[in-house]
């Protein structure tokens, strides 16, 4: 399993290299704009296919900072942040309280349209990258995510932070939220790469991969790329059947169950 | 071997699931229960989303009860008329259950109601069965010959109107308790995501005095049809029936059930009931502990809308 994985990883990395080089060409074509492209990034793959043997994967993100930039500002401090964000979800966080000796859900808060997946990779700890406002505006870092709450919350105002914190912790435990400072490595003076692990329980849908370049704490450039996570083959056919023809899907399940039961009865018949 | 489940959207170890299906199938064949009350918590504890566990177990119960029904059918140990009357009650109870299920889910109290119901019903039925079976075993030990069937002895149920004759069960009773029993179990079954065999079997034996030999086959036939309806209803409303998970569970389940059914024939009735009582009490206790002990994390999250909801 391990050699296979590393082989896969090597292939992905190689592919990523090629993609990074290819991506430079359109960037070069855009050089006629007044400002040269400071930041170029590319994904190892823009589609993640989920098949029956899917147990999670990782994507490699390559990129390059403009050489001119480095040359013209030799003393400047450059930092990078890359975020991967999944499609939105409404998620309710509930808190149990003891009531008549039994633990039951009492207070709850619903976070609306929050990312179903969020991974941030940065060159250094998030708070050192830029001013808080910049981080908040661009949703860089777990504690700078915008988590809007629904109007009908019954949580006392002074407990709200607890719910936010608990939500982020639970999502991190599930592997769906992560923040990894120092996870971006520089391959050369201007070229960098990072890998973002995608756990097996990632939701399907359109993901956004955003890259940010900071110069001395101010945002210099940002790039956005799409990543699509989807089921293919049998997984896709089954899922589509269950959503588009739910009655027949249910009937199929029942027929399958009765046949299995009957078959077992025939096979194991002794009397 | 890991296998990705298309509806649950997570990978599972297929052998673990197969083994769970087999173990629960064995018990279901042994005791003539659907096994849902064991399998649903097992799946939830192993990380399958609760909604998927509840819906998929209904499909697995169809397979395991179909397998067992054939065995009892061949032995002519099914009262079809009784099963049909129970089913009429069961379907109306299920319809009510679906409504309550939706209300509780939107209030976020479904887990609580499931836990409390499990504790209450499993605790009560388990304790009653335990006492009864121990008494029966003691009687046997002391050499007292029990009168298995006392046709002359009637309880209040036998005084109700609308009587109907059930030849196979050698019964002449009112349809009211049968319809009520069917609908109560259909209702509880839908809310709790279980077939309800563990409640049906003792109720038929102790309340209606259906002969023990007929009870299991009849109860299983009733469960087969209720759970088939539940599978289709879940596919259409919650859309959480995972056919891959169900197939893995049912293959393990039907194989286990065959062995369980054979072993059940070699055990005495009261021994069987003692074992089932201990099992039912154990599961009930497990839920009680969860309700009473301080949870590791008082917070929990649930996806309400969007990807993966």
Image (cartoon, rainbow, N blue to C red):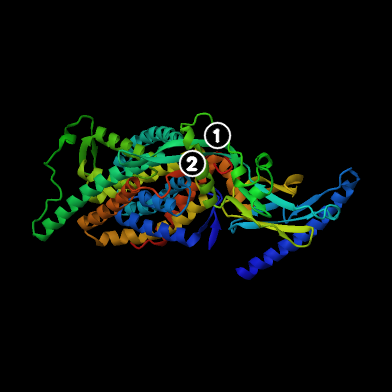
* Above-or-below relation of B28 to B236: below
Image position, residue A210 (x, y; %): 71, 47
Q: Secondary structure at mark 2?
A: helix
| A170 w.r.t. B257: above or below | above
Front-most of B4 and B201? B4
- Chain designation of label 1: A
Residue lying at the far right in this picture: please name it.
A32
Q: Residues within 10 Å of mark 1 (few under 14, many from 20)?
A: some
Residue picked out by circle 1:
A149
Quadrant (top left/top right/bottom left/bottom right) for the N terminus of chain A: bottom right
Vertical placement of A100 versus A75: above or below? above
How much space separates mark 2 and mark 1, taking CA atoms? 13 Å
In percent of the image, x 79 and y 50: which residue is there?
A39
Residue B229 showing in the rendered view: no
Q: Is residue A164 above or below residue B30?
A: above
Instruction: Say the numbered circle drawn on residue A162.
Output: 2
Percent position of residue A172, x then y: 54, 50
Q: Residues within 10 Å of mark 2 (few under 14, many from 20)?
A: few
Q: In the rendering, at what x and y percent does residue A169 appear?
A: 52, 48
List the single residue furthest toward the front.
Answer: A75
């Amino acid at each position: 399993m391990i050699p296979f994985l590393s082989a896969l990883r090597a292939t992905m990395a190689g592919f990523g290299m090629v993609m990074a080089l290819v991506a430079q060409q359109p960037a070069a074509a855009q050089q006629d704009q007044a400002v040269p492209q400071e930041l170029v990034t590319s994904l190892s793959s823009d589609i993640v296919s989920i098949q029956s043997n899917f147990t999670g994967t990782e994507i490699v993100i390559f990129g390059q900072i403009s050489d001119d930039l480095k040359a013209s500002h030799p003393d400047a401090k450059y930092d990078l942040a890359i975020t991967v964000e999944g499609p939105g979800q409404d998620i309710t966080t509930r808190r149990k309280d003891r009531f008549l000796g039994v633990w039951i859900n009492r207070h709850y808060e619903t976070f609306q349209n929050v990312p179903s997946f969020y991974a941030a990779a940065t060159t250094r700890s998030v708070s050192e990258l830029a001013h808080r406002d910049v981080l908040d505006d661009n949703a860089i870092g777990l504690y700078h995510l915008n988590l809007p709450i629904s109007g009908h919350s019954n949580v006392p105002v002074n407990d709200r932070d607890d719910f936010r914190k608990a939500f982020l912790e639970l999502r991190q435990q599930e592997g769906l939220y992560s923040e990894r400072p120092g996870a971006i490595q520089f391959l050369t003076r201007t070229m960098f790469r990072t890998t973002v692990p995608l756990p097996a329980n990632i939701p399907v849908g359109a993901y956004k991969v955003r890259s940010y370049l900071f110069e001395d704490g101010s945002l210099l450039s940002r790039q956005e790329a799409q990543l699509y996570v989807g089921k293919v083959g049998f997984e896709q056919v089954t899922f589509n059947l269950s959503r588009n023809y739910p009655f027949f899907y249910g009937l199929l399940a029942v027929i399958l169950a009765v046949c299995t039961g009957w078959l077992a009865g025939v096979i194991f018949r002794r009397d | 071997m890991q296998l990705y489940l298309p509806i649950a959207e997570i990978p599972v170890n297929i052998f673990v699931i197969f083994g769970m299906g087999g173990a629960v199938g064995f018990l279901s064949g042994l005791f003539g229960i659907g096994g849902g009350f064991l399998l649903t918590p097992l799946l939830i504890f192993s990380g399958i989303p609760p909604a998927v566990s509840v819906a998929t177990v209904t499909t697995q119960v169809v397979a395991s009860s179909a397998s067992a029904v054939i065995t009892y059918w061949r032995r002519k140990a099914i009262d079809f008329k009784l099963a049909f009357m129970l089913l009429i009650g069961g379907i109306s109870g299920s319809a009510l259950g679906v409504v309550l299920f939706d209300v509780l889910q939107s209030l976020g109290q479904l887990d609580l109601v499931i836990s409390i119901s499990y504790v209450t019903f499993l605790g009560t039925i388990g304790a009653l069965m335990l006492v009864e079976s121990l008494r029966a075993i003691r009687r046997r030990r002391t050499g007292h010959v029990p009168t298995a069937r006392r046709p002359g002895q009637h309880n209040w149920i036998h005084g109700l109107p609308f009587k109907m004759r059930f030849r196979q069960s050698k019964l002449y009773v009112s349809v009211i308790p049968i319809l009520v029993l069917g609908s109560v179990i259909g209702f509880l079954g839908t809310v709790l995501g279980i077939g309800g065999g563990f409640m049906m079997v003792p109720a038929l034996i102790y309340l209606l005095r259906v002969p023990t030999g007929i009870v299991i086959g009849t109860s299983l036939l009733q469960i087969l049809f209720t759970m088939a309806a539940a599978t289709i209803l879940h596919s259409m409303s919650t859309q959480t029936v995972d056919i891959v998970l169900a197939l893995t569970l049912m293959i393990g389940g039907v194989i286990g059930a065959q062995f369980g059914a054979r072993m059940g024939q070699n055990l005495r009735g009261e021994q069987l009931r003692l074992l089932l009582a201990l099992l039912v009490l154990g599961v009930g206790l497990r839920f009680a502990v969860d309700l009473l002990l301080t949870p590791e994390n008082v917070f929990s999250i649930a996806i309400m809308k969007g990807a993966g909801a």
